[in-house]
Amino acid sequence: MTRELIVLGTASQVPTRQRNHNGYLLRFDDQGILFDPGEGTQRQLLLASVAASDITRICITHFHGDHCLGLPGVVQRLSLDGAPHEIPVHYPQSGAEYYARLRNASIFYDRAHLTEQPIDADGPIATGRFGQITARKLRHPVDTYGYRLAEPDGRTMLPDQLARAGVTGPDIGRLQREGILRRQTGEVTLDQVSKPRRGQIVAFIMDTGVCEAAVDLAADADLLVIESTFLSTEEEVAAESGHLTAAQAGQIAAQAGVRRLVLTHFSQRYTELGPFAQEAAKHFSGDIRLAEDLARIPLPPR
């Protein structure tokens, strides 16, 4: 199973020649979660060799255009391709009017199976085999939510120990489900033939100022995707507009104990992105990635 972030766009308010509007697809085993489809996302999916039918869920942080103007094209492509599965769409409840406009922005034969799941409070918004997705309200001039996917902890089976205990075939599954296997030759417990495996965590934080919710969302994340619109020279502008600098993104990652930090949502005023990584590295000593359009960023191994 694949676990990776496919970057579809990295520009903030205005796209550039090198950077498309925002857009991110998280592949998490059999899940394809599309975050913030900005303008041009349908074409970026094509360039990234991602089928629209790979999308299993859509999460919109807020309704500024660079985070949602690609939704009509994605919806109509889902309909054209006849995606057979239900696709939940999460977004701030206060933006329901904008969602309705985007959902029906033009004439098309609507066959998309979308289920609206607006958010009006912090807390869990979805559960499944992948674990749980939680939303937290961020600090921005309009209602904005960040997202956190947390996989439950599990266990890794140890082939050598299984062989030594003589556990094979269907008995392995039974042992995983029941925790103990009773046989005439004696009992075998799950602890004897496996070891703990921590569930993986992915956090997605877009437009926000520094706030406690951002740190909570990112806590212990294996992968944090976070906006870093400005450099520190524009810290006042960032504060006024409800955005982060690269240094502040690094501080959040350090406080939260993140493993891999992905910086994105860059202002059009910057053509060189190296300084973003340099600023973040002053505060965060872990793995830092600068998001680039069409890049694939794997989750770090457990």
Image (cartoon, rainbow, N blue to C red):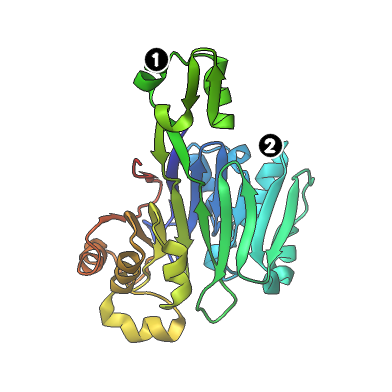
Q: Which amino acid does label 1 sit on?
A: Ala
Helix, strand or loop at disc 2? helix
The one nearer the camera, 40 or 152, is 152
| Left or right: 42 as drawn, with respect to 21 | right
The one nearer the camera, 104 or 166, is 166
Instruction: Classify residue 69 by image quadrant.
Output: bottom right
Instruction: Classify residue 156 by image quadrant.
Output: top left
Residue 60: x percent and y percent? 59, 61
Q: Which residue is drawn at 50% across and 42% down?
A: 28
Above or below for 81 versus 228: above
Residue 143: x percent and y percent? 60, 76
The one nearer the camera, 113 or 179, is 179
Q: Residue at x 65, y 71 (%)?
A: 121
| Left or right: 117 as drawn, with respect to 47 | right
- Mark carried by residue 85: none
Where the C terminus falls, by quadrant? top left
Q: Name the residue under label 1.
A: 163
Helix, strand or loop at disc 1? helix
Q: Residue at x 49, y 36 (%)?
A: 49
| Left or right: 222 as drawn, with respect to 77 | left
- Camera-near label (1 vs 2) is 1
Q: Mark 2 points at which residue?
A: 81
Above or below for 109 versus 234: above
Question: Counting other residues with Cα less than 10 Å from the Cα at mark 2, is it few (<14), some (14-19), or many (20 or more)?
Answer: some
